[in-house]
Image: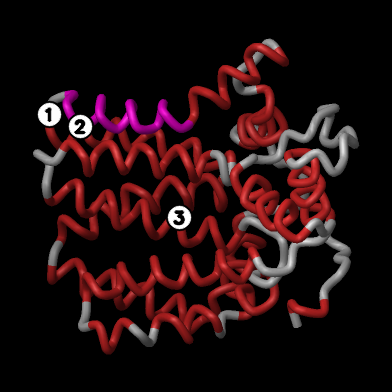
């Protein structure tokens, strides 16, 4: 159980905690990793962990992962309420918590569960913005949140491509510019810092970006589409996959425009993680 954890064998856990300790001045140790000699992990979640460290004066994160699970559950239920009644939407909470990957990884100091909540939030925001294309605030908030998820996990820089979708859908640049302004408010300080300190605004992305680009032209390691599919099955189970497919069919007949918005977010995700 999460309350009895005081150590963990996962390398990523220690990097996130170490980065949080650097933020609050508890440590200045920056081990080299994946060819870089600085703590290059995305800063948002370690920054949130740093709040707990500074309040409790501890060197271990105990309560913040549970808080992040709660925020993720709220986002999932909130989106579900768009498609069904509030009483039925409540069932997504135990369904999500009972997923094997959530039961194990969700209690650790990792990024997966908070990223899931932010992903759901951005999907919901895109649906909302596509329904109300005249709303400037919706487009800006969509950009702000897309920037936040990028600072949570760098692979989600692909969501900057939402701006292309907005141009295609609207046949003008208005919403796309608003989206970019929101994204820039969040990300420009981060990119500027890395430009000044390391000479490259995308230096922290080097390990992931180089792997992805090389993966377009060659097989790297043993991770294949088949391996991804097995992992995906283990994470959400066969029942979850069937439920997702049924939900997509129902949404297709109920409101095709919302399904398109979901696919705008989801299709690149599958391509990047399963094919590249």
Q: Which residue is drawn at 78% across and 56% down?
A: 13
Mark sitting earlier along the chain (3/1) = 3
Q: Mark 2 points at which residue?
A: 175
Kindly indicate the quadrant of the structure image that contains residue 33.
top right
Q: Is residue 32 magenta?
A: no
Secondary structure of residue under mark 1: loop
Secondary structure of residue under mark 3: helix
Mark sitting on residue 118: 3
How far is mark 3 from mark 1, CA to CA?
Answer: 27 Å
Q: Which residue is drawn at 13% across and 70% down?
A: 254
Q: How crowded is mark 3: few (under 14 residues within 10 Å), some or many (20 or more)?
A: many
How far is mark 1 from mark 2, CA to CA?
Answer: 10 Å
Type of secondary structure dominating the magenta stretch: helix
Q: Would you say the residues marked 2 and 3 are in contact, meaning their CB atoms lie under 8 Å apart? A: no
Instruction: Give the x, y percent position of residue 10.
Output: 83, 60
Q: What stretch is highlighted in magenta?
A: 173-186
Instruction: Give the x, y percent position of residue 41.
Output: 70, 40
Assign the C terminus to one quadrant of the image. top right
Instruction: Give the x, y percent position of residue 109.
Output: 71, 61
Q: Does the magenta stretch include residue 184?
A: yes
Mark sitting earlier along the chain (2/3) = 3
How far is mark 2 from mark 3, CA to CA?
Answer: 21 Å
Horizontally, is 71 left or right of 207 in the view? left
Q: Which residue is drawn at 68% across and 72% down?
A: 107
Colour pattern of the rendering: secondary structure
Q: Mark 1 points at which residue?
A: 171
């Amino acid at each position: 159980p999460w309350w009895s954890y005081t150590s963990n064998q996962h390398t990523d856990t220690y990097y996130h905690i170490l980065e949080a300790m650097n933020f609050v001045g508890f440590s200045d140790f920056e081990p080299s990793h994946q060819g870089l000699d600085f703590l290059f992990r995305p800063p948002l979640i370690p920054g949130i962990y740093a709040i707990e460290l500074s309040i409790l004066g501890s060197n271990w994160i105990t309560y913040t992962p549970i808080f992040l699970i709660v925020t993720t559950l709220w986002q999932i239920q909130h989106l579900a309420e768009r498609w069904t009644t509030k009483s039925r939407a409540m069932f997504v909470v135990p369904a999500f918590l009972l997923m094997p990957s959530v039961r194990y990884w969700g209690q650790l100091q990792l990024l997966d569960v908070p990223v899931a909540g932010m992903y759901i939030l951005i999907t919901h925001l895109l649906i909302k913005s596509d329904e109300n294309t005249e709303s400037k605030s919706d487009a800006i908030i969509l950009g702000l949140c897309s920037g936040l998820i990028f600072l949570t996990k760098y692979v989600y820089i692909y969501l900057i491509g939402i701006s292309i979708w907005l141009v295609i859908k609207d046949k003008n640049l208005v919403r796309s510019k608003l989206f970019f302004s929101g994204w820039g408010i969040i990300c420009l300080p981060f990119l500027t810092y890395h430009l000044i300190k390391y000479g490259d605004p995308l230096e922290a992305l080097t390990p992931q970006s180089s792997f992805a680009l090389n993966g377009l032209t060659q097989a790297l390691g043993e991770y294949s589409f088949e391996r991804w599919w097995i992992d995906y099955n283990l994470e959400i189970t066969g029942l979850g996959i069937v439920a997702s497919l049924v939900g997509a069919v129902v949404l297709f007949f109920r409101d095709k425009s919302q399904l398109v918005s979901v696919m705008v977010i989801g299709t690149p995700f599958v391509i990047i993680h399963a094919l590249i």
